[in-house]
Image: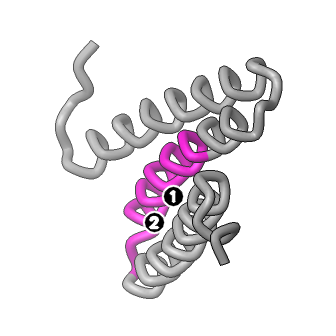
């Protein structure tokens, strides 16, 4: 029973939760006729998912390259989410 609550298992549960949440939220936005908001939500979820994958790779003792790639992907997802949010809200993105 104590194997369930190891840090790597908790990260796995959080990853599964983010995937489920992203699917539910994107389907909800699509049915409401707002595909741009669905894309924004998926970009936001992708950033969180990549951060959790970086933590999972670090906890598993994987090569540092995988951690760095996940962190770089999370940065790109955050920048994409930021750009989409600026477009949805009608505000110009700052440079």
Q: Are marks 1 and 2 in contact (CB under 8 Å)?
A: yes
- Left/right placement of residue 90 relative to residue 73 reads left
87 vs 6, left or right, is left
Is residue 82 shown above or below 14? above
Q: Main secondary structure of the magenta part?
A: helix
22 relative position to 86: left or right: right
Viewer-side residue, 12 vs 29: 12
Residue depicted at x 43% and y 36% = 78
Q: Position of residue 87 (x, y in %)?
A: 30, 43
Mark 2, residue position = 38
What coloring was used for the rendering?
A: one colour
Range shown magenta: 33-52
The residues tagged by marks 1 and 2 sit, at their Cα atoms, a distance apart of 6 Å
What residue occupies the far front of the structure in this picture?
A: 2
Which residue shows up at 54% across the image and 29% down it? 76
Closer to us: 60 or 92: 60
Rendered-image quadrant of the N terminus: bottom right
Q: Which residue is mark 1?
A: 42
Q: Nearer the viewer, residue 69 or 93?
A: 69
């Amino acid at each position: 029973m104590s194997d369930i609550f190891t840090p790597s298992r908790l990260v796995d549960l959080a990853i599964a939760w983010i995937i489920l949440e992203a699917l539910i939220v994107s389907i909800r936005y699509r049915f409401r006729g707002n595909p741009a908001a669905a894309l924004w939500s998926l970009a936001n979820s992708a950033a969180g998912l990549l951060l959790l994958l970086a933590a999972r790779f670090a906890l598993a003792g994987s090569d540092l390259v995988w951690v760095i790639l996940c962190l770089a992907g999370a940065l790109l997802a955050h920048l994409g989410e930021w750009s989409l949010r600026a477009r949805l809200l009608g505000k110009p993105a700052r440079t």
